[in-house]
C-alpha cells in the first residue's frame, strides 16, 4: 500500500509518498503516469498538505448502501444513481465548512469512501475499471439537506451539495487496498455517528466506475464519492466533524 499526497514546500507544489506518517519521499513527473522518486525526503511537519489531486469532476452516488436504503424504505436502484458536486465547492485540508449566507437550515455531514481515477476511462467493463482506479480517499459529502425538496417539482441535489466549502476529500490517495471491505467512520465532536463497512454497497467500486464511464469520459484525478450509509446527520455551528477510513486516513473540519 502507498499513500500519495500533494503538498507545498518552499512555495512549490509537489507530490510524493508518505512513509510511516513521518517522512515524504518526493516524486517527479505525473502522479498518475509513471511517477519517479527523486531521492529527496522531507518531513511531514515541514510541508503544507494540499488536496491529493485536482479533479475535473466530483461525482457522488445516491442510494448505494443497503442499510440506509432499508431505513428510508428504498429499493436497490436498477443502476448507480449519481449527481455532480461543483469543483468550486472543494476546500483544502483543514479548511472550515462555511454556512451559505442564503441558507439557514440544516447542514449534514456524509462520510464516504472516494474513488480516484488513474487512467482515461470511457466505455470500460468492470475488469478494466479495477485497473483504471488509481486509489481511494476519504470524503465528507457536505449537504444543505433542506434544499433538496424545497421545490416540489425538482429535487435539488446538485445545488444542495455544491456550495463553497462543501467538497471535502483527502488527506491522501491510498493505493493497493481492498475497497470491498473498508470500515468508514464519521465522528461528530469525538462521538462516533457513522460506522459502516463498504461491503454494504449495492454497487461496488468497479461497477460504479464502469457504469459512469459509459456516460462520460473519466479523467485521471476525477473523484467519485461512493455514497453514504446510516448515521448521516446535521452539524451545528462550532462542531468538529471527522471522517476516517481504515488504511486511508482521516479528514477533519470545523463547521463555522
Image (spheres, helix red, strand yellow):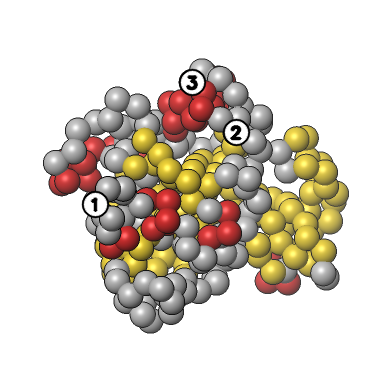
Q: Position of residue 54 (x, y in %)?
A: 66, 51
Distance (Cα) linking label 3 and label 2: 14 Å
Contact? badges 1 and 2 (CB < 8 Å): no
Q: Which residue is mark 3?
A: 126
Compare residues 88 and 28 and report the one nearer the observer: 88
The quadrant in which the C terminus is found is bottom left
Q: Residue furthest front?
A: 153
Single out the mark in the foreground, 3 or 1: 1
Callout 3 secondary element: helix
211 above or below 237? above
Classed neighbour count for the residue bearing mark 2: other residues with Cα under 10 Å, few (<14), some (14–19), many (≥20): many
* Residue 255 picture quarter: bottom left
Going from N to C along the chain, the mark reached first, 3 or 2, is 3
Compare residues 243 and 182 and report the one nearer the observer: 243
Give the label on residue 218, or none: 2
Give the label on residue 228, or none: none
Contact? badges 3 and 2 (CB < 8 Å): no
Distance (Cα) linking label 3 and label 1: 37 Å
Does any portion of residue 35 appear in the rendered image?
yes
Residue sitting at x 66%, y 29%: 120
Q: Is residue 77 left or right of residue 82?
A: left
Single out the mark in the foreground, 3 or 2: 2
Residue sitting at x 65%, y 62%: 50
Going from N to C along the chain, the mark reached first, 1 or 2, is 1
Residue sitting at x 51%, y 66%: 165
Amino acid at each position: 500500500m502507498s499513500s500519495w499526497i500533494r503538498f507545498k514546500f518552499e512555495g512549490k507544489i509537489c507530490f510524493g509518498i508518505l512513509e510511516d506518517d513521518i517522512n515524504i519521499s518526493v516524486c517527479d513527473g505525473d502522479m498518475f503516469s509513471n511517477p519517479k522518486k527523486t531521492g529527496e525526503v522531507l518531513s511531514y511537519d515541514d510541508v503544507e498538505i494540499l488536496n491529493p489531486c485536482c479533479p475535473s469532476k466530483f461525482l457522488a452516488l445516491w442510494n448505494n448502501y443497503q442499510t440506509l436504503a432499508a431505513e428510508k424504505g428504498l429499493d436497490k436502484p436498477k443502476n448507480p444513481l449519481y449527481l455532480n458536486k461543483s469543483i468550486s465547492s472543494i476546500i483544502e485540508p483543514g479548511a472550515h465548512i462555511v454556512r451559505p449566507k442564503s441558507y439557514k437550515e440544516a447542514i449534514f455531514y456524509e462520510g464516504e469512501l472516494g474513488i480516484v481515477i488513474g487512467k482515461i476511462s470511457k466505455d470500460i467493463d468492470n475488469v478494466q475499471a479495477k485497473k483504471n482506479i488509481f486509489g481511494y480517499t476519504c470524503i465528507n459529502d457536505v449537504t444543505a439537506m433542506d434544499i433538496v425538496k424545497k421545490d416540489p417539482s425538482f429535487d435539488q441535489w446538485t445545488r444542495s451539495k455544491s456550495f463553497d466549502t462543501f467538497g471535502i476529500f483527502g488527506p491522501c490517495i491510498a493505493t493497493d487496498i481492498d475497497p470491498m471491505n473498508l470500515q468508514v467512520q464519521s465522528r461528530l465532536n469525538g462521538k462516533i455517528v457513522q460506522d459502516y463497512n463498504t461491503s454494504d454497497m449495492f454497487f461496488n467500486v468497479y461497477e460504479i466506475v464502469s457504469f459512469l464511464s459509459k456516460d462520460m469520459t473519466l479523467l485521471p484525478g476525477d473523484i467519485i464519492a461512493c455514497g453514504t450509509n446510516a448515521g448521516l446527520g446535521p452539524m451545528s455551528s462550532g462542531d468538529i466533524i471527522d471522517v476516517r477510513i481504515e488504511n486511508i486516513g482521516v479528514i477533519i473540519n470545523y463547521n463555522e
